[in-house]
Image: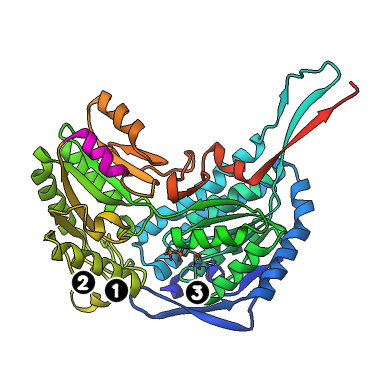
Amino acid sequence: PLALLNDPGLLKTDALIDGEWIAGTSRFDVADPATGARLADVALLGASETAAAIAAANAAWPAWRAKTAKERAGILMKWYQLLIQHADDLARIMTAEQGKPLAEARGEVVYGASFIEWFAEEAKRVYGETIPSTDANKRFIVLKQPIGVCAAITPWNFPIAMITRKVAPALAAGCPVIIKPAEQTPLSALACAELAQRAGMPPGVLNILTGDAESSIEIGGVLCASDVVRHLSFTGSTEVGRILMRQCAPTIKKLSLELGGNAPFIVFDDADIDSAVEGAMVSKYRNAGQTCVCANRLYVQDSVYDAFVEKLAAKAAAIKVGNGFEAGVNQGPMIDAQALAKVESHVADAVAKGARVVVGGSRGAGALGQRFYTPTVLSDVTAEMLCAREETFGPVAPVMRFKTEAEAIALANATEFGLAAYFYSRDIGRIFRVGEAIEAGMVGVNTGLISVAEVPFGGVKQSGLGREGSRHGIEDYVEMKYLCLGDI
Ligand code: ADP
């Protein structure tokens, strides 16, 4: 699929340090999750190259921070435009290594690029403060200054957007960055880096370290231990988030963490059921259920339960599963065998404990068997089942019954996670009550799609720290400095 790029120069397989493409001393394979075929071999870096990238970023910092915000914004805006111009090629690269259908990949390119546009604009609005003085001889001023060298460790499920929402605010604020993309999807990251080079990003300001699963641990260890790296932003599993947090303790590094979710999706009896079914479809099955804001637990009020399950199952059965490059396909493969095995184990556990498979419930037929899972709806699901407690990260909708509003809120909050939540109701009083009571960083009310660059994305409880996107998203990348002027 990568032979068909309009601009073959976007297929980069070396890492980027200090403006130079680095082949590394060894390589690792990147495969197409739909077929298992090898796509490319990519530079496998380790501790020494990580140290070199940190030194390069640190050396690039003074000149980058000294640029005016408008100058940095100019480079970011150029980068944004290049991503949009090359959206078709970037989508092909993404579908090849990640599996999501081409149209969905193209949507992510545009969404990912929108963070660069947004933070290019926000770069110019990092305002400080003057504080009314309590002493006639003094003046109080607050500056906001770039935090320093930033590191970003990102996952495979959104190979571009999870990078841009971290890197764009860091760069806008005046910080150089070092990115360690997921081992499954380095090609999208490297293509974006090539476009950053073309946009005029100075050497050392944006660096990409690639590695396989094992060397990612080594690279991560060096980034966390460095006292030059002042901030780490990570999106991924809560388990790895805890490891990184621990590794950052000795240097008291600032952290932005976007970790696991376990999103509840509640349908009240006063909801527009067709709209709730539509919302559940996009929230649940997008990216084959492999997003941290995917509806993971569906709670439907008693009197509308049967109607909802029936309509959802009919829609789920109509999803076309297949290779993301095929026309009309709207669900691609799972990222790897482990992801598929987790989905299978959740369904087997639910069935063993009395759940009913309304639709799906198996791997794809024939050639699709090794890598695909059919869109699934489970009814009669109970709180004891694994799929009601853990993030399934696959195309499985477990539907549970509830009777009262209070019960629905208690069920929704019975988790250590708090990223996204969704509910459907037409009652304005209920919308406020439930919206306020739900323990989550983001709540979709009568919608299953909530993410855009303009709003604060992030979680509460063990779903993470900090917010990405919005005018708040740049705050993690600046430090406040209080200047107290005496002898006035
Ligand atoms: P997922 O379950 O989505 O694959 P992970 O949390 O395992 O999420 O991985 C997300 C990112 O974290 C990837 O870039 C991966 O290489 C990286 N990673 C995983 N384990 C570690 C670790 N111990 N140290 C540093 N990075 C890690």
> Is 353 on the left or on the right of 329, as rendered?
left
What residue is disc 2 on? 364
> Is 379 on the left or on the right of 435, as rendered?
left
What residue is disc 3 on? 213
From where the camera sits, is residue 399 visible?
Answer: yes
What residue is disc 1 on? 371
Gap between marks 3 and 2 measured at Cα: 27 Å
> Is 309 on the left or on the right of 343, as rendered?
left
Q: Residue furthest top?
A: 136
Kindly identify the amino acid type of the residue bearing the numbered disc 1. Answer: Arg
Instruction: Tell me where residue 223 sits by quadrant.
Output: bottom right
From where the camera sits, is residue 12 visible?
Answer: no
**Badge 3 residue CB within 8 Å of ligand 1:** yes
Instruction: Tell me where residue 180 sits by quadrant.
Output: bottom right
Gap between marks 1 and 3 measured at Cα: 20 Å
Q: Residue 12: x percent and y percent?
A: 56, 72
Decide whether residue 405 is among the magenta residues.
Answer: yes
Decide whether residue 175 is among the magenta residues.
Answer: no
Crowd tier of the residue under label 3, counting other residues whose Cα lies within 10 Å: few below 14, some 14–19, many 20 or above: few
Nearer mark to the viewer, of 3 and 2: 3
Gap between marks 2 and 1 measured at Cα: 8 Å
